[in-house]
Image (cartoon, helix red, strand yellow):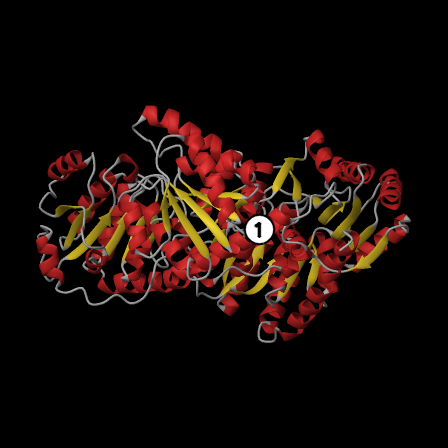
């Protein structure tokens, strides 16, 4: 593989480090040629590192374009990789000239690159923004950067994320710490706890927050000292602020550090970052290499490195009071600093090494070349329609599972999702998405797609909404008439109660659907009773059964943010508002009290759909005085919810997908049935612990708690049933693959 990299050559900071370390290591595997548009320290350092480097200097843009086009053709390069505004502009001009795919790594937010320089922002910033939109693919140096740009209208399925990685080879001994710190001007002794930051002194880095936070921490811990490595236009103002706050003797402005940063980081006890905006900071991974306890703003991709309260601390930009509390806490607790630093090192060294960055970059190149070579077809990919973008974790889990399965068929498959909140869907799943109300938008998508998926859940029913039933039937008809093959994917059917709705559903499904895969047998019976016989009908399982829990660190962080100790003994409750729930709500609180007093299980009330479920949980917990309980209202991703439910010893649930999530982890289940789909699923996996909501009593709910507690010691039966369903679920995928002609 031969890739040509374009860069201005005047770059510094994280972008410089990223490009040079990446190319140095890429050249061990492929040919990565560097083209700089000016000579100077950047190019000199690249040559010193053994990176093949050429200079194409000057302001004659069109001459440089011709020169580069000839160079690329003669050299047999396969891909153009740009870094920075000048490179992006020239790369956009080379797309048609060379016929090669062009990708840009976006190292920072182009809207604030020229903060404080309005003319440069108007010129270079505007040119860069326009050029970025003309390129084929884009790489953000964090998921947060990718999400930011998708939110600005960039195509979500043309993005990749790559994190800045460093070499975690153990550093050599850096010599006497006190001697070094005193040479920098610091007033330190053996007992000092040294807080440090390495950053430019400009408004984006928000150093006033650091100094205010440090001053507050120093008032609680006099051992603390602060060393600021860096320089910039705000230095004078910052020195005045330190004097004003009475910490000028404890704060050292060290200026730029020469000779590399290893010695600086080795002398610190706590690493900090207070940036208002950041992609993914090298300063934090470099500190992690030295096992430093870390406190940072929760911006950009930093939350991907730091799981707050697990391996570090995060705070909101500008919140110097919270920063101060964290610094004081770390300053006063030596063992906590060591523990946090060690945990951060373990995560950073496994997930953010330079080798990980290189491997990711090579994977991106391979995918881009594969996608570039993909034959152009008049019809390609799928349109997926379901109850997405409504804030319901169960429905979103179905979408996540379907997307994974479509990508297992064809990783480059074009996918469009109809969503109530298309912006959120684009950000979360990196797919094209149009509003459910945008009729021209989804009709256009259908005209270009090969397969339409009515995606999971109980969509064909009229219990919750007649309009919903009509919407999905209209979409099925429109998709078929637009030329799509149509599959209802791992879905539930019914109840359809009205006679005219049953007749209409049967007519549409018989005429316009090619195949229906069902998540449980009761849905098959409902189809049969309605007279649906024309489509191929196959019994499979719910797609969400295939999802996996998030990693332990992420789950720990989710629980801690909710105030839940990660290693406790818990029983979960997943409730929802429904006619008749208000009268039964106190019974759940009584059952929670019983589980705590009898089995030592602390109740955790989990919201699958945030707003209504949180209200239901609060209603149930009235009168639980004296009993500890927790609320998990916003776990985030399906993986995080699954991981949290895996920490339960039992689950009492009205929510179907809470049952599905927990079942996949072998957790004993007790269902409260508000809709036949709940009992249908439990019967399908061989579970008999359920009762109808209207028949719920304190006695039968306590009895179910007793039985789940007894079954907790023998999860193997349920695990075997779920494993069987996961295998059967593959019928959803194989049917879609066949309908796609693959």
Residue at coordinates 56% horizontally, 38% vertically from top-left?
155
How many numbered marks, from 0 up?
Answer: 1
Residue occupying image coordinates x 30% and y 37%: 204
| Above-or-below relation of 119 to 239 | above
- Residue 396 appears at what percent x and percent y? 61, 48
Quadrant in which residue 719 is drawn: bottom right
x and y percentages locating residue 114 in the rendered image: 33, 31
Say what secondary structure mark 1 lies in.
Answer: helix
**Along the line of sight, which residue is nearer the eye, 598 or 346?**
346
131 horizontally vs 535: left or right: left
The answer to whether residue 170 is above or below residue 483 is: below
Q: Residues within 10 Å of mark 1 (few under 14, many from 20)?
A: some
**Which residue sits at x=22%, y=55%?**
260
Q: Is residue 202 above or below residue 720?
A: above
User: In the rendered image, is residue 31 in sight?
Assistant: yes
Left or right of 185 on screen, residue 345: right
Q: Is residue 584 visible?
A: no
Residue 591 horizontal/vertical position (percent) = 57, 60
Q: Residue at x 55, y 56 (%)?
A: 639
Query: Which residue position holds label 1?
Result: 369
Residue 552 place in picture, x, y as percent: 46, 63
Camera-side residue of 275 and 24: 24
Between 555 and 346, the one lying in front of the other is: 346
Res 245 → quadrant: top left
Q: Quadrant of residue 265?
A: bottom left
Q: Quadrant of the C terminus?
A: bottom right
């Amino acid at each position: 593989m031969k890739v040509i990299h374009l860069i201005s050559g005047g770059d510094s900071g994280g972008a410089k480090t990223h490009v040079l370390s990446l190319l140095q290591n890429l050249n061990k595997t492929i040919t990565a040629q560097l083209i700089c548009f000016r000579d100077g320290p950047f190019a000199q350092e690249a040559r010193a590192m053994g990176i093949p480097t050429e200079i194409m200097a000057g302001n004659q843009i069109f001459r440089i374009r011709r020169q580069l086009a000839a160079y690329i053709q003669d050299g047999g390069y396969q891909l153009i990789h740009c870094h920075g505004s000048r490179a992006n502009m020239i790369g956009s001009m080379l797309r048609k000239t060379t016929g090669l795919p062009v990708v840009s790594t976006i190292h920072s937010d182009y809207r604030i690159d020229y903060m404080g320089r309005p003319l440069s922002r108007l010129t270079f910033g505007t040119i860069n923004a326009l050029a970025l939109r003309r390129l084929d693919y884009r790489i953000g140096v964090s998921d947060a950067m990718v999400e930011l740009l998708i939110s600005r209208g960039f195509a979500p399925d043309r993005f990749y994320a790559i994190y800045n990685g460093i070499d975690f080879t153990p550093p050599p001994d850096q010599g006497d710490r006190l001697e070094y710190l005193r040479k920098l001007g610091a007033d330190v002794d053996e007992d000092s706890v040294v807080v440090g930051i390495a950053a430019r002194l400009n408004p984006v880095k928000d150093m006033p927050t650091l100094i205010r936070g440090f001053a507050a921490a120093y008032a609680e811990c006099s051992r603390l000292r602060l060393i600021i490595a860096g320089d910039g236009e705000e230095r004078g103002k910052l020195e005045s602020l330190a004097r004003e706050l009475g910490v000028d003797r404890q704060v050292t402005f060290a200026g730029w550090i020469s000779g590399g940063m290893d010695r600086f980081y080795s002398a610190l006890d706590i690493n900090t970052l207070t940036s208002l905006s950041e992609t993914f900071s090298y300063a934090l991974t470099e500190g992690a290499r030295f096992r430093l306890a870390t406190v940072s703003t929760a911006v950009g991709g930093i939350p991907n490195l730091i799981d707050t309260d697990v391996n570090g601390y995060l705070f909101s930009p500008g919140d110097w009071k919270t920063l101060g509390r964290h610094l004081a806490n770390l300053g006063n607790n030596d063992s906590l600093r060591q523990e946090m630093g060690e945990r951060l090192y373990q995560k950073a060294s496994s997930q953010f090494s330079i080798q990980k960055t290189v491997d990711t970059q090579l994977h991106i190149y391979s995918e881009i070349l594969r996608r570039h070579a993909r034959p152009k077809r008049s019809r390609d990919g799928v349109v997926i329609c379901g109850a997405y973008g409504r804030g319901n974790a169960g429905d979103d889990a179905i979408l996540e599972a379907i997307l994974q399965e479509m990508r297992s068929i064809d990783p480059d498959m074009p996918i469009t999702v109809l969503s109530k909140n298309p912006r959120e869907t684009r950000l979360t799943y990196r797919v094209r998405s149009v509003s459910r109300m945008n009729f021209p938008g989804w009709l256009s998508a259908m005209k270009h797609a090969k397969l339409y998926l009515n995606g999971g859940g109980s969509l064909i029913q009229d219990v919750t909404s007649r309009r919903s039933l009509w919407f999905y039937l209209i979409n099925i008809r429109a998709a078929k008439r637009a030329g799509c093959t149509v599959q209802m994917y791992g879905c539930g059917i019914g109840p359809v109660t009205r006679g005219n709705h049953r007749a209409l559903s049967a007519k549409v499904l018989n005429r316009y659907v090619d195949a229906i895969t069902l998540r449980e047998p009761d849905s098959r019976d409902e189809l049969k009773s309605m007279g649906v016989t024309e489509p191929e009908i196959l019994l499979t399982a719910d797609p969400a059964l295939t999802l996996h829990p998030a990693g332990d660190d992420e789950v720990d962080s989710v629980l801690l943010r909710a105030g839940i100790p990660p290693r406790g003994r818990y029983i979960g409750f997943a409730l929802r508002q429904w006619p008749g729930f208000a009268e039964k709500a106190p019974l759940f609180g009584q059952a929670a009290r019983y589980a705590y007093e009898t089995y030592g299980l602390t109740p955790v009330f989990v919201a699958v759909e945030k707003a209504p479920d949180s209200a239901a949980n609060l209603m149930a917990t009235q009168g639980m005085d004296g009993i500890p309980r927790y609320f998990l209202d916003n776990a985030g991703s399906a993986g995080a919810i699954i991981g949290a439910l895996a920490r339960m010893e039992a689950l009492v649930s009205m929510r179907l997908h809470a049952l599905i999530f927990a079942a996949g982890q072998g957790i004993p289940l007790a269902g409260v049935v508000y809709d036949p789909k709940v009992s249908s699923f439990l019967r399908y996996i061989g579970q008999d612990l359920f009762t109808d909501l209207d028949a719920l009593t304190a006695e039968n709910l306590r009895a179910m708690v007793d039985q789940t507690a007894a079954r907790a010691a023998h999860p193997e039966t349920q695990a075997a049933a779920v494993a069987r369903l996961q295998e059967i679920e593959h019928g959803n995928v194989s049917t879609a693959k066949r309908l796609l002609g693959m």
